[in-house]
Image (tube, grey):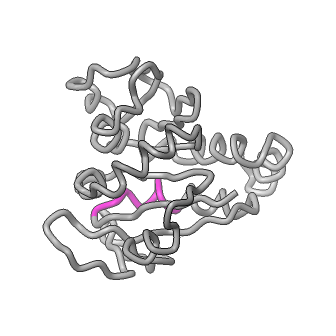
């Protein structure tokens, strides 16, 4: 499957890297995409996370948009972190992409702050169960928020709680896109309990 992971300045590193790592171990075609901060139009391939860890994204957003054209991926993922989630939410292209992905029953995944910051403006939470970082759900009336769980998968929407649940979330993502057999191999090979 072809999957894009969107990284904006201030993203939560453990949520991004864990998911990318496990999906690639599962043989998925994962691309990381650099998204600019909402206060800048300059997009570089280097993105600094919320804890000062910088990463080279595989592609910048402008090039990603051009290469994708009118086609869709199999899945997209938004890690949390602040101001990373706010930077993602400020990108009108990503809001539109989520809507198109949802309409076409493609997988949309978001974790931590992103379900509460990015997804409400897309309409994807309506009539779905979801989770996010504790307390960030308080102003959101769409769908049904589920507290105190590592992740929720409902229809084509996968949401996760926060950094401490990154591995559980990533493994659920693997199960969804690659199947139980591949997930079990990764679980054993990575010494998970």
Q: Residue at coordinates 49% horizontally, 52% vertically from top-left?
A: 77
Place residue 7 in its image quadrant. Answer: bottom left
Q: Position of residue 147 (x, y in %)?
A: 41, 22
Viewer-proximal residue among 138 and 97: 97
Is 68 positioned to the left or the right of 21 in the image?
A: left
Is residue 13 on the magenta stretch?
yes
Is 24 rendered above or below residue 66?
Answer: above
User: Residue, x 28% and y 62% (percent of image)?
Assistant: 10
Count the labels in the image.
0
In which image quadrant can residue 127 be found? top left
Work out which quarter of the rendered image holds the N terminus and state it. Answer: bottom right
Task: Please indicate whether residue 111 sits to the left or right of residue 31 in the image.
Answer: left
Residue name at image x 20 percent, y 75 percent: 41
62 sits to left or right of 70: left
**In magenta segment, residue 91:** no
In magenta, the rendered stretch is: 10-17
């Amino acid at each position: 499957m072809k999957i894009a992971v969107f990284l904006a300045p201030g993203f939560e590193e453990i949520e991004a890297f864990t998911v990318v790592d496990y999906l690639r171990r599962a043989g998925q075609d994962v691309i990381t995409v650099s998204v600019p901060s909402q206060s800048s139009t300059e997009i570089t391939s280097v993105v600094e996370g919320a804890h000062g860890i910088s990463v080279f994204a595989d592609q910048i957003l402008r090039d990603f948009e051009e290469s994708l054209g009118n086609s869709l991926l199999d899945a997209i993922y938004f890690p949390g972190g602040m101001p990373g989630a706010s930077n993602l939410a400020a990108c009108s292209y990503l809001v539109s992409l989520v809507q198109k992905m949802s309409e076409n029953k493609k997988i949309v995944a978001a974790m931590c702050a992103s379900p509460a910051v990015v997804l409400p403006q897309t309409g994807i939470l309506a009539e779905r169960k979801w989770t996010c970082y504790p307390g960030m759900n308080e102003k959101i009336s769409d769908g049904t928020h589920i507290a105190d769980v590592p992740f929720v998968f409902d229809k084509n929407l996968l949401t996760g709680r926060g950094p401490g649940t990154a591995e559980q979330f990533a493994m659920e993502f693997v199960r969804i896109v690659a199947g139980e057999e591949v997930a079990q191999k990764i679980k054993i090979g990575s010494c998970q309990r």
